[in-house]
Amino acid sequence: MATPVSFDTIRSAPKVLLHDHLDGGLRPQTVIDLAAETGYSGLPHTDAAELGEWFHRAADSGSLERYLETFSHTVGVMQTPDALVRVAAECAEDLAADGVVYAEVRYAPELFQDGGMTIDEVVQAVQDGFREGERRVAESGKRIRIGTLLCAMRQNARATEIANLAVRYRDAEVVGFDIAGPEAGFPPTRNLDAFEYLRQQNAHFTIHAGEAFGLPSIWEAIQHCGAERLGHGVRIVDDIKVDDNGEVQLGRLASYVRDRRIPLEMCPSSNLQTGAAPSLAEHPIGLLARLRFRVTVNTDNRLMSHCSMSSEFHALHETFGYDWADMQWFTVNAMKSSFLGFDERLAIINDVVKPGYARLMA
Ligand SMILES: O=c1[nH]cnc2c1ncn2[C@H]1C[C@H](O)[C@@H](CO)O1
Ligand SMILES: [Zn+2]
């Protein structure tokens, strides 16, 4: 008989995470410890439970801009190499404890230079932290692999420099590039040089698009910039019509995204907080999964959204009735869409993901 689906059994299932921000996933106690160690005095609370609650409430703002304001505190305490090593190592441990077997964790190196670190020192510290975290996880008898994506912030003008950094560290588990930050007023085409450079280097990139802004942003990300995946991409539903009889009609852009199997890095809890979807029941993931878009499930910011891969899967199970087969589908979708090489993706799917779900479904 199949294992019943519950939060605890979902935690034991192998999961793959493609969209998680390093500076959005700190443990509240770590924020407090690092603030004390580094002399950061701006925290609204010094009790871990209260601080965790504060992040969640403050991020629950209905707007992406206000949601992003909460990052000033996490970024504020991540300005030394030691802080970055600790945050990255704990990130690997927390994800592994939640049953994540492969993750692509992203961050913007340019945000961590206030204390004088060079951009290379930032990347090296984060890489050291992830390797340390992977080692601790292996010691505990589990296994996780973490690739990183380097983000450039839309509002700054350093995309080409950060793209170059991603290429320089591509053989050290930096698997790709992204642009993040406020979407309205900062179209991805501002960074065309960076995307052109990455394509010439045969490098991988995703773009946050179609979260706070609609179809033009998605269209630019794919057709002008050449994004392989879409961060969020929820607004692709604006190009899908469902009539009163339930008949579905896809516009040209939605068809293109589905036909080309362009992965959607969907982050349901985050979308509820920024106002990109009104409720989980009305979240476009239901329709997009039913239409067999290449949907993946992600956390975005575990601290701000007070979530994990397991809590996202569990909420989706309760809302849409997704079962183990659906969770395996999301997980295989994610692994197929990762920026690892083909052989490595296949090995994780065949050796880890499929046997894990087979056990749960047996
Ligand atoms: O959902 C998001 N949309 C756009 N930008 C975001 C989102 N979540 C986090 N960020 C920003 C804030 C972080 O400081 C930055 C790099 O991780 O990315
Ligand atoms: Zn994001």
Image: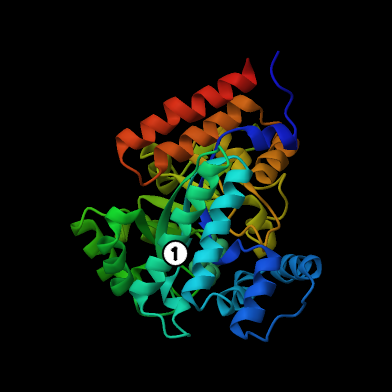
**Which element carries disc 1, helix, strand or loop?**
helix
Image quarter of residue 151: bottom left
Q: In the rendered view, how is the structure colored?
A: rainbow
- Relative to the observer, which residue lies in front, 135 or 146? 135
> Where, by quadrant of the figure, is residue 324 drawn?
top right
In the picture, measured across the screen, residue 6 lies left or right of residue 124, that is: right
**Residue, disc 1:** 126
Which quarter of the image is occupied by the N terminus? top right
Please tell me which residue lies in front, 249 or 102. 102
> Residue 313 location in percent, x, y?
66, 40
Q: As drawn, is 136 to the left or to the right of 339?
A: right
Q: Residue at x 41, y 58 (%)?
A: 149
Q: Position of residue 212 (x, y in %)?
A: 56, 64
Q: Amino acid at mark 1?
A: Val
Residue at the spot x=59%, y=77% of the render?
77
Residue 158 horizontal side relative to residue 332, left or right: left
Q: Position of residue 38 (x, y in %)?
A: 59, 82
Relative to 246, does residue 17 appear above or below in the rendering?
Answer: below
Mark 1 surroundings within 10 Å by alpha-carbon count, few (fewer than 14), some (14 through 19), many (20 or more):
many
- Above or below: residue 83 compared with residue 222: below
Instruction: Please tell me which residue lies in front, 227 or 108.
Output: 108
**Quadrant position of the C terminus in the picture:** top right
Residue 361 image-quadrant placement: top right
Is residue 183 in sight in this rendering? no
Residue 74 higher or lower than 127, as above or below = below
Instruction: Give me the residue at 49% from left, 65% from top.
Output: 85
Marker count (numbered): 1
Q: Does any atom of ligand 1 lie closer than 8 Å to the CB of label 1?
A: no
Seen from the viewer's position, the closer of residues 119 and 151 is 119
Residue 315 appears in the rendering: yes
